[in-house]
Amino acid sequence: MVEILILVTAVVAGFLGALLGIGGGMIVIPVLTLILGVDIRYAIAASLVSIVATSSGAAASFLRDRLTNLRLAVVLEVGTVLGAATGFLIVRHVNSKSLYFLFAAFLIYTALSMFRKKQDSRAKINHPWSERLKLGGMFTEHDGTVIHYGVEQVPLGIFFMYFAGILSAVLGIGSGIFKVMAMDGAMKIPMKVSSATSNFMIGVTATASAGAYLMSGDVHPEIACPVAIGIIAGSWMGARVMPKLPAQTIRKIFIVVLIIVSIQMLIKGVSL
């Protein structure tokens, strides 16, 4: 019965993770720890496995649909990795309680900003770095419309990725949600490309961490296996559905997830 609950949760997490490019950890960890009483270390290890599985399960489909921007992903990963390294260095000197409240406030503000947006993001001016590195791209909508897009404010996007890496290391959370917000809000990249590119990036980031947890013995097969199977199935479905959905629908789902995560962060901050 427990394995079935984990499997169903993982399917839902995989579906949303692939659809929004955020990984399934924010769904898997609360269920494992709060409902099933799993040790937080094992839950985090299973969550990292789920992130790798989400990314792997959806990557092929997004690459085939030309939604994933590989050049942009490589550039932005530099900021995330540097931020994560900084986070590991300062984690013992930071007041986590304050960070949780700050994080929650930032997510609520972002959710309100995205709610007021009536149209999908589209860069009006291609940043010189984007021109030089050829970061712009194109994809085809489900109705056959070809969308060409550029990339604005590349340095600001890298800075946001650096900030995302710090929060990921300090708070022990995935940074996919920040990646999508940075690409959609600061760099004016279409929502579908932001989600698909974030999906690819979180897989790269999580692989190293998952390997560390595996070597430390925190990956328990009875937990990680149902999570991985469910996540792969859910992410496959999410990757099939995402290209067919209007960008505004994806944005609305993302706003709901932002609010849920902000509430989780507030509860976590109060409990510290």
Image: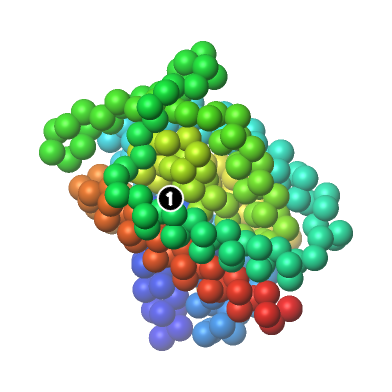
Q: Is residue 115 visible?
A: yes
- Which residue is farthest right? 93
- Horizontal side of residue 224 vs 44, given as left or right: left
- Which residue is farthest top? 132
Residue drawn at x 54%, y 19% is 129
Tell me, what colour scheme is on the image?
Answer: rainbow
Crowdedness of circle 1 by 10 Å Cα count: few (<14), some, many (20+)?
Answer: many
Reply above or below: 13 against 19.
below
In the picture, the quarter occupied by the N terminus is: bottom left
Q: Percent x, y for residue 23? A: 48, 56
Q: Label 1 amino acid? A: Gly
- Which residue is farthest left? 143
Q: Is residue 54 visible?
A: no
Viewer-closest of 47 and 101: 101
In the picture, the quarter occupied by the C terminus is: bottom right
Residue drawn at x 42%, y 36% is 188
Reply above or below: 92 against 56.
below
- Horizontal side of residue 272 vs 207, given as left or right: right
Q: Percent x, y for residue 31? A: 50, 77
Residue drawn at x 37%, y 55% is 116
Q: Percent x, y for residue 178? A: 54, 50
Reply above or below: 146 against 249.
above
Reply above or below: 164 against 37.
above
Residue drawn at x 52%, y 17% is 128
Residue under label 1, please give it: 21
